[in-house]
Image: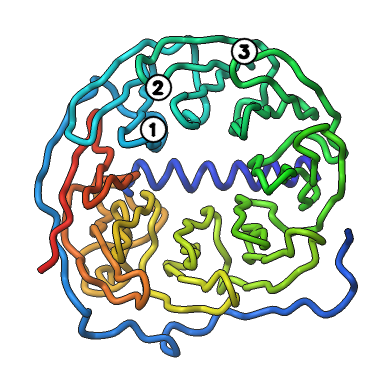
Amino acid sequence: MSNCRSAILYCICLLFVSSVLSGCISGENNGTAVPTTTAMPTTTTPVPTEPPYTVRLADAWTLDIGGEPEFPPVLLQDSICVVTEERILLVSDGGDVLWDKPLSGDTEIAPISAGEFVYLVYADGRVERRGGATGEVLWTKSVDAYPAVPVCAYRESLYVASDGYLLRLLAETGDDVWSVELPEGTVYSCIVPCGDQLLLDTFAHNVTVVDAGTGAILNEWDARCDMGNIFVRDDSVYAMGGVCLTCLDADSGNTKWEYIFPGRGSWTPAFVDYPYAIVSTIDDQVLCINMESGTLIWSDDAMYRGGLAVSGNVLISGIAYVPDMYKTGQGSWDPSDTPSEIVGELVAWDIGTGARVMSVQADQGLKWPVTIGDRFVFVLGTGLTCYTLEYE
């Protein structure tokens, strides 16, 4: 199973790298039948031909940060935290550099922001806490952290995956509180808080439920979340897998519903803006799924790989591949194509209806948008580019 999971993860990485190069953007289940919804053809959920409005992006500012970002930026309160190969920077919503500090080593995941602090995980297993106001290192601790999985900052603690164990540290000092061995080995994709519990995506398609205070293993849920992420809303837990999105009861782990993705499924984690879960499929579709019912709200023929962001009712992609364009000879979507031959558009949708409110040619390097109010900030090469959203 470990070899299988590693192979899947390797495929995910290949898809991601290809997209960047191309310019883009308990109880156990009680045995009753699992409520399942199957993806409907796009023609049964048509995108409105006339959008309720249209939007445009107006230039706000650009900033050269001296190196290409390694990961999608994260928000630290109202500012943008971004990591290059050698440095970590905090940029204001107006495009000013608030601080710029060297990294303490090689990183393999994006920084984790929590309140007024930033956490970094280094490839050699160290975890570091920095002050958000200055970027100064407050403490560094070597814990043999599993480098590809984010830590989880929750309440007064920091939870770290470490080679088959889950560690709890005091967030303020980095001091050890406890260490617990996980029944399914190393955390695979995420550590997510849920009330007084933590939900860990571990191997064998399971969610391991851990008491956040004591580290006691409370349960294991079969969630089929073998290639993605877990997210929580109210009394529901959502597990994103390669073939489906599964909704579980947060108390029992029993399945509420399961949405089966069309075609070959998805290898991109869902983007969530409640009550919408947005999924990109391998077969060039964007799906919008109702998180309460598990039904398909809308779908569109496009594949995003450069990230998504929402401002108000507007969902925007990094550069997205739009199959319609390839039918007209403007480009093609063939794995043998070189990046220069693949053309993408900057697409925006009304998130509630799926109507395209913008679809324009743009720089093929625009990716990883983040939202601050009515502004979208994209990564572009070695810099950041900010646009203001305007309704027409």
First in sequence: mark 1 vs mark 2? 1
In the rendered image, residue 49, in percent from the top left (x then y), is placed at 24, 85
Q: CA distance from mark 1 to mark 2?
A: 7 Å
- Residue at image location 64% in from the left, 14% down from the top: 174
Asked if residue 342 shows in the view, the reply is yes
The image quarter in which residue 263 lies: bottom right
Q: Amino acid at mark 1?
A: Leu
Quickly name the residue at label 3: 173
Binning the other alpha carbons within 10 Å of mark 1 as few (below 14), some (14 to 19) or many (20 upward) gives many
Q: CA distance from mark 3 to mark 2?
A: 16 Å
**Kind of element beneath mark 1:** strand
Please say whether residue 23 is visible from this viewpoint: no
Q: Is residue 392 above or below residue 310?
A: below
* Vertical placement of residue 379 versus 146, above or below: below
Residue 110: percent from left, percent from top? 47, 31
Report which residue position mark 1 lands on.
76
